[in-house]
Structures are given as C-alpha cells and as structure tokens.
Image (cartoon, rainbow, N blue to C red):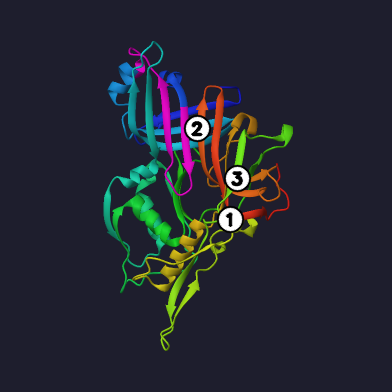
Amino acid sequence: MSANLRLMLLMGRVIAAPAPAVLLDALRSVQVTSSSGAASGFQLTFAVAKRSPVMQVLLPSGALDPKTRVIVVAVVAGVPHVLMDGVVTRQEINPGTAPGTSELTLTGEDLTLLMDLRHVQCSYPGMPSHLRAMAVCAPYAQYGVVPVAVPTVISNLPDPTIDIPAQSSTDLAYLRNMATDAGYVFFLEPGPAPGVSIAYWGPEVRAGILQPALTVDSGAATNVESLTFGYDGLSRTQYTIPLTEPNTKITFQVPVPDVSLLRPPLAVRPAVTMREEPLPDLTGRTIPEALLLGLSRTSASAEAVTGSGKLDVLRYGHVLSARQLVGVRGAGLAYDGVYYVRSVTHDIRRGEYKQSFTLSRDGLVSNTPVVIP
C-alpha cells in the first residue's frame, strides 16, 4: 500500500481479530459495494500457492469457511474508514495454469445476512413499527449491532384489542417490509469503530454535512476520472388514493402528499410528473397505513436525476461514502449542486484505491447558492 493508504483486515467467528500476516501478504485485491436500501457485499482475492500456509493451514482448519466474520478498514491519510463488517458466504479456488497465477477468492455480505437465515414467528402487541424494528435488531448486539429507529411521519399505533402486528418471516424480511410500508429504508452501516455497526431503520438521510465536492471539467481542480448525468422523464409517478363520497357514491382520486415529507428537496426544479396511477395494495389497510404506503411509492419514483462516475481516492483525498450527501461542481447550472450518494463500489489494490459511484436527486438546478470544495 502507498504511504497515504493502509488496509486493515480482521477476521473471526463472532469477535474479529487481526488477520494472520501470511493472509495479508497474500491479499491481492479488495472490492466492497455499499448501496442504499440493499445489503452490502465484498470480495477478497488472495494470491496462493499449493504449499503456502493459506492452502496448507488456514483453509483446512476452517479459518476461511463461510460465516467467518470479516472486517475491512481502509486508513486514508491517517483517518480510518470501516468499509465492511460482514460474513463470508462463498469460497472459490482457481489453481491457475502457470506459477504465480493461483487465486483464492472469498465472497460475502454484510451482517444483515445473519438476519436472513432463520424464519421467525413472533407477535408485537401494541408496538409501533419503530419499536418493533428495535426489538428485532436486539439479538444481534453480540456482533456489535446498535439499532437506531426513527418513528414514522404519520402515527400508526396498533390497537392491541383489534390488530396485533405479527412476524412470520426472517428478521431481515420483516424489517425491510416494515420500512417499505413506511417509506423508509433499512441497512447496516459499518463503524464508526471496527466491530460496531449501526442498524438504521428510518428515512433516507438528506441533511447534514456534505462530503468534499466532486469536481469535473475544472482543469487542475478536477478530482474525478469521469462523471455523467441523466434525467429520466418517466421515472416520477403521481399516486392517488380513491375515496368514495358516501351520499353520492362518487369516487374521487386524492393525490398522495408530496414526497418532501420524507425527503427534503435537493433541487429548485422538481422532475416533471408524467404518470398518474392509483395506489395499489390498499385492501385491509387503515388510512394512516395507506398514506404511509403512498409516501413510500412516491419517494421510490422521485429520483429522476441520476449521476455515475469514477474517482481515485488518493487524488480525491477522502473516501466517498454511500447513503450521504455530496456536492458536485463543474457540471453546469442544471446539474451542479447537492446529490444523494446512492451506491459506492470500492476497488483496492496495492498502491491503488478507486471508487465507482452513483448519485441521485429529485430535479434540476441546485437549491444551494454555492458548493464548497
């Protein structure tokens, strides 16, 4: 690794410890993908030989078996960034056809995988959805998982004499279904320290301190290798809820409230709404449940402006993080401004650290007067 880049690798069953030196010496590349609303994944590639300690000791002893915990920490300019806290799901060996070409590849997912391995039947009488989310995450404290749940924007406290919320699925499926119904997301954010993760159940965070700006087409100030944008005019949909007037029996289509209830706007000109559809799956839902479902569907379709690009972390000077905000400069009046970082893929090799990323927001023209570098 270069002077400005160091990599830490920790492994274990429940508690992870520094990986053996022979394994670090054999490490050839690391790839980690993080995205909003989905599980994160990783892939570690090692150069091995038939008689190496990795092949002779670590593999036969089960030290690299599936369900082994893996923590990846990148230290850039002296600042540690926990990129992944997950478990191995697959092991592949490629013996190679020439000396020095044999490779061992470990593939895995973040700790949400552990939440998706066992079917659970449980009831939560009188508990609102955010407290249910906290209760579901509680057993994973042994892995350093700290739950953070945000109450829904529309209160929907179930009456225990009429409706008792019940789970009949894996913990992960239940958490995601509750999040979808509320217009929220659920994910695990590794860090801030190795061995600790935040289990976040709530709205996508569209506020806070911006990450250092991505600068394009600005001469020496340019810090990205590529960055392109697109505007999909068919992505945004106006959902409506049918209401029937009891006396005349006339049905009205009532528009679902604007998505800004969940996501503060990032642009002055919101994307044009070209589609209008009735909200599906309303059978048996209360009015608060229907409104929350409408907010969920509307928010999912609101991100009409997207961007994608690549950067060199050592030139950028920071590690771009998914699920946070970042500024963009140099793309012109329509596309400059603040974006939500939807996904990031980290590609690390010796002396090299590249990132691929995707951005999104709700329209054109920034609602901030200037983007600070």
Crowd around label 1: few <14 · some 14–19 · many ≥20 (10 Å): many
Disc 2 on helix, strand or loop? strand
Position of 352 with respect to 144 (left or right) is right
Q: Identify the amino acid type marked 3.
A: Phe
At 39% from the left edge and 38% from the top edge, which residue is drawn?
A: 109
Crowd around label 3: few <14 · some 14–19 · many ≥20 (10 Å): some
Pointer 2 or 1: first along the chain? 2
- Residue 24 occupies quadrant: top left
Q: Check disc 1 and report the residue beneath it.
A: 362
Q: Check disc 2 and report the residue beneath it.
A: 73
Specify the farthest residue to the bottom: 247
Q: Identify the amino acid type marked 2.
A: Val
In this rendering, the answer to whether 37 lies above or below 264 is: above
Q: Check disc 3 and report the residue beneath it.
A: 229
- Residue 134 occupies quadrant: bottom left
Coordinates of residue 220 in the picture (x, y in percent)? 73, 32
Disc 1 on helix, strand or loop? loop
Coordinates of residue 76 in the picture (x, y in percent)? 58, 30
Which span is picked out in magenta?
30-54
Mark 2 to mark 1: distance in Å?
33 Å
Disc 3 on helix, strand or loop? strand
Q: Identify the amino acid type marked 1.
A: Asp
